[in-house]
Image (cartoon, rainbow, N blue to C red):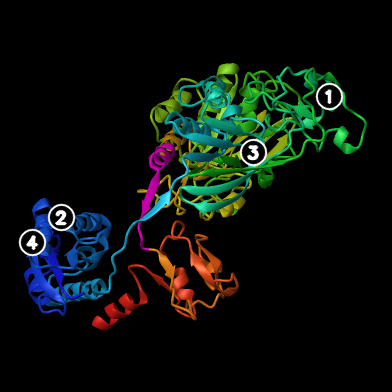
């Protein structure tokens, strides 16, 4: 390459105030290979782009360096301009004079000299650039949604409504997630089941959605637009095609003493069960760990009672293989185990319960049909203490973050107690009240001012039992640390929200990162909040961090919009700045020795291997092979390759060495 053009931008005063832009342009004219150099006030403007186009044509330029602001901002603009002028887009490079020079230095001759050096680097680099074409990746126009809570439901419906096929995978026997367990939702106190159940039914009936409950993702391979997923559909021991949901089998099962996880262990269920009355799908599942039949005892009462012969004791797990173009992770959260609160007496005192257990007591479909009772004696409590931040913002418990929803649902619980038992007294111990949301602060004030809930700013140090009462000891920090002692009938812990069980293993299968607490990490907290570092995999809901229902639904729709935009195309155009294993003529074929150290180090699973064969099919050599659809151009393989057989397009060893030597 021998004819280069250099264009230096003033960027108003962003660059021009500290860098002598005219001097930079003049000095660039004398650099080897530069055929034309000039400066302009705003190169990103239409007149500025036209100057570049005209110069390419007039001076027969075969490469361009634009010295301006961050390539992150305007590189696509300048590449589009050189393309319009007939050059390959990748024969254009940007020297960052704003962020790397003018914004970090005072006006001085040394600042201008640095700017010249930055341009010189790019001049030497672009001399060795090669024309590149975008990588065209075919797209499988369907999506996988992992998780059947409100986040997964919203994402699946939005994608399906756009005309694309969706496979939804839910680990439990029914849809709904934690939202199905709630009594009412803040800040409107509308019935959770009333607003959730129609959405669950919509999922089950949507022609574009394939629902796989009681299923888990077993294995994932592939890349954006072309994921291959193996799903394990666990055996229900009930034929879903034959079952009508009549419930006859449930009545005949003799095992009645299994703790009901949907009711948070507050009631018992049978060994064959439907999680809750409004479950979708309304198909029972046999709990093989507690079923008499699977314990080696003689029992087939459910099978005899079934009018359609849907009970299948010999049913096996199925592996279902699907191909999708995008994946939405919506695996939700779990609450901190109560065994981590010995200071509050959980496990010792039955009347110390979690927020989710209180929800089940308050729910009309719960174990007490909506009557709030003490677990110890079944009586309605007269005094209830609610402990906010139980485990959250507590380094000793390993949770330094705020669980975000606790302040609001604690206020809701106190309200529900007052609404159901007007004479009851409600106390809330809190650190701070965090009610940032539409009508949220008004909701908390309503609990305090209208319902008479007593808020005490301070932590509880100890809970013990005395004369049938729970003695709650703490301090009121607003009164200078004055000791507080309350005799309560019940204590409710607002337990910290944690990543869901198994989320770490799923993240490894998907090759996505997690934060220090185990939540799935987003690609960028501000600019790419619903994307992961693995292209084509998106996030929705509390798998990313604790969040409430409105925010979860909004994020699910955002993830669905990203998926829909991706699936709306038949092919995906990707940047060609990816790694490549070199090829040579026989007999060497490649410098690659086949050690495959690069394969083990690649964070994107983009490297495999291939066999080079002769005309007779004999294997001559095994070498690494890079999938350009998976490669993200990070360069890890380049740095590790012992024989330097791998180069990165746009950042080759030759280019990097040339830049260094130019200085």
Pointer 4: what residue? 40
> Which dot, 1 or 4, sits closer to the camera?
1
Of the pair 462 and 83, the residue shown nearer to us: 83
- In the image, is residue 411 above or below residue 67? above
Pointer 1: what residue? 303
Asked if the stretch drawn in magenta spans residue 193, the answer is no
Looking at the image, residue 358 sits to the left or right of residue 574; the answer is right
Residue 230 x, y percent position in the rendering? 62, 46
Mark 2 and mark 1 lie on one chain; the one further toward the N terminus is 2
Label 2 – label 4 distance at C-alpha:
10 Å
Pointer 3: what residue? 171
Pointer 2: what residue? 44
Quadrant where the image shows the C terminus: bottom left
Residue 564 x, y percent position in the rendering? 41, 38
Label 2 – label 1 distance at C-alpha:
74 Å
Of the pair 132 and 467, the residue shown nearer to us: 132
Q: Residue at x 32, y 68 (%)?
A: 650
Label 1 – label 4 distance at C-alpha:
83 Å
Quadrant where the image shows the N terminus: bottom left
User: What residue span does the magenta drawing correspond to?
Assistant: 559-577
Looking at the image, residue 613 sits to the left or right of residue 662; the answer is right
């Amino acid at each position: 390459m021998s004819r280069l053009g250099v264009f230096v931008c003033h960027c108003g005063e962003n660059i021009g105030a500290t860098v002598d832009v005219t001097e930079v342009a003049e000095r660039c004219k004398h650099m080897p290979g530069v055929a034309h150099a000039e400066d302009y006030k705003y190169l990103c403007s239409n007149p500025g782009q036209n100057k570049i186009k005209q110069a390419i044509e007039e001076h027969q330029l075969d490469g361009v360096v634009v010295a301006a602001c961050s390539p992150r901002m305007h590189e696509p603009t300048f590449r589009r301009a050189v393309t319009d002028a007939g050059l390959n887009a990748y024969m254009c490079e940007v020297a960052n004079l704003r962020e790397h020079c003018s914004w970090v230095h005072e006006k001085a001759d040394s600042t201008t000299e640095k700017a010249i050096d930055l341009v010189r680097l790019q001049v030497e680099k672009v001399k060795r650039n090669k024309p590149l074409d975008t990588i065209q990746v075919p797209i499988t126009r369907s999506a996988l949604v992992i998780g059947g809570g409100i986040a997964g439901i919203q994402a699946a419906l939005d994608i399906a409504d756009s005309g694309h096929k969706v496979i939804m995978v839910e680990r439990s026997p029914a849809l709904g997630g934690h939202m199905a367990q709630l009594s009412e939702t803040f800040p409107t106190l509308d019935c959770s089941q009333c607003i959730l159940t129609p959405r669950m039914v919509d999922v089950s009936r949507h022609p574009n959605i394939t629902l796989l409950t009681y299923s888990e993702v077993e294995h994932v391979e592939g890349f954006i637009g072309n994921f291959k997923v193996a799903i394990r559909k666990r055996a229900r021991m009930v034929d879903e095609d034959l079952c009508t949901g009549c419930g006859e089998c449930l009545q005949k099962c003799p095992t009645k003493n299994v703790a009901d996880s949907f009711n948070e262990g507050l009631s018992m269920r049978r060994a064959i069960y439907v999680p809750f009355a409004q479950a979708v799908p309304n198909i029972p599942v046999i709990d093989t760990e507690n079923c008499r039949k699977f314990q080696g005892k003689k029992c087939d009462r459910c099978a005899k009672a079934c009018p359609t012969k849907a009970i299948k004791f010999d049913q096996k797990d199925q592996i279902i293989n699907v191909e999708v173009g995008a994946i939405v992770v919506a695996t939700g959260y779990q609450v901190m185990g109560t065994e981590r609160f010995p200071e509050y007496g959980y496990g010792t005192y039955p009347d110390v319960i979690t927020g989710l257990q209180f929800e089940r007591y308050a729910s009309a479909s719960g174990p007490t049909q909506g009557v709030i009772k003490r677990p110890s004696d079944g009586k309605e409590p007269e005094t209830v203490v609610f402990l906010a931040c139980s485990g959250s913002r507590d380094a000793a418990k390993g949770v330094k973050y705020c669980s975000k929803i606790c302040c609001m649902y604690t206020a809701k619980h106190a309200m529900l107690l007052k609404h159901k038992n007007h004479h009851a007294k409600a106390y809330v111990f809190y650190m701070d009240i965090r009610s940032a949301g539409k009508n949220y602060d008004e909701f908390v004030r309503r609990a305090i001012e209208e319902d008479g809930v007593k808020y005490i700013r301070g932590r509880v140090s100890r809970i013990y039992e005395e004369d049938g009462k729970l003695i709650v000891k703490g301090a009121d920090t607003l009164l200078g640390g004055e000791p507080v002692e309350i005799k309560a009938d019940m204590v409710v812990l607002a337990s910290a929200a944690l990543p869901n069980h198994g989320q770490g293993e799923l993240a490894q299968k998907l090759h996505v990162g997690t934060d220090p607490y185990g939540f799935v990490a987003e690609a960028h907290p501000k600019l790419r909040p619903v994307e992961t570092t693995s292209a084509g995999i998106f996030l929705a809901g509390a798998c990313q961090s604790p969040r409430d229902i409105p925010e979860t639904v909004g994020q699910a729709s955002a993830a669905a919009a990203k998926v829909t935009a991706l699936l709306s195309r038949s092919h995906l155009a990707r940047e060609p700045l990816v790694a490549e294993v070199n090829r040579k003529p026989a007999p060497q074929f490649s410098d690659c020795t086949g050690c495959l150290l690069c394969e083990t180090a690649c964070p994107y699973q983009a490297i495999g291997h291939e066999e080079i064969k002769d005309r007779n099919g004999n294997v001559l050599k095994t070498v690494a092979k890079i999938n350009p659809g998976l490669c993200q151009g990070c360069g890890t393989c380049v740095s590790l390759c012992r024989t330097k057989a791998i180069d990165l397009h746009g950042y080759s060893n030759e280019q990097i060495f040339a830049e260094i030597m130019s200085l």
